[in-house]
Amino acid sequence: DRKKRAMSFFARNVASTALRAQAPRATARLAAPVRHMAAKPSPLYSTLMDSNMKYITFIVSGCIAMEFVYGSATEMLWESANSGRLPHHVDWSTWAEDEGGEEEDEEDEDEGE
């Protein structure tokens, strides 16, 4: 009895699946509206997006240009926020040692040996 019920359950599932596959769908899918190209493409399209290579070149060169602008702007902000604190702002001539003093230190080390 149990085997018969299992077989009939299996048979019903297979039959209903086959019927569903053959039956037309009740809900029709709406087709996407067809967009036609204009008779004459815009200058932007013909200049930048006419071919894949032109488009990729435009994107890469645009990224490089934006990186240059962004880098210059952030560098300018950093310099203005830290003016006088960065190594290239320091007047190193005020910290210069006498050149003779360095030679004397070397001579003192030689005598100690």
Image (cartoon, rainbow, N blue to C red):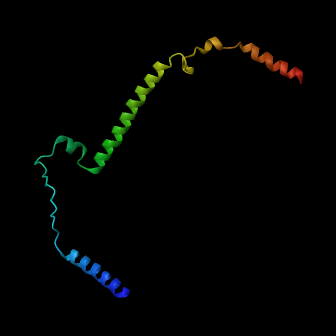
Q: Residue furthest left?
A: 39
On the image, the x and y values in percent for residue 18 come to 24, 78
| Image quarter (top left, top right, bottom left or bottom right) of the C terminus | top right
Residue placed at 25% from the left, 43% from the top?
A: 48
On the image, the x and y values in percent for residue 109 come to 84, 21
Residue placed at 69% from the left, 14% from the top?
A: 97
On the image, the x and y values in percent for residue 16 come to 24, 77
- The answer to whether residue 6 is left or right of residue 15 is right
Residue placed at 41% from the left, 27% from the top?
A: 72
Residue placed at 55% from the left, 20% from the top?
A: 86
Observer-nearest residue: 19 or 77? 19
Residue 68 sits in which quadrant? top left
On the image, the x and y values in percent for residue 15 come to 25, 81
Residue 101 sits in which quadrant? top right
- The answer to whether residue 53 is left or right of residue 70 is left
Q: How many marks?
A: 0
Is residue 100 shown above or below 110? Answer: above
| Image quarter (top left, top right, bottom left or bottom right) of the N terminus | bottom left
- The answer to whether residue 109 is left or right of residue 10 is right
Is residue 16 shown above or below 82? Answer: below
Is residue 93 shown above or below 49? Answer: above
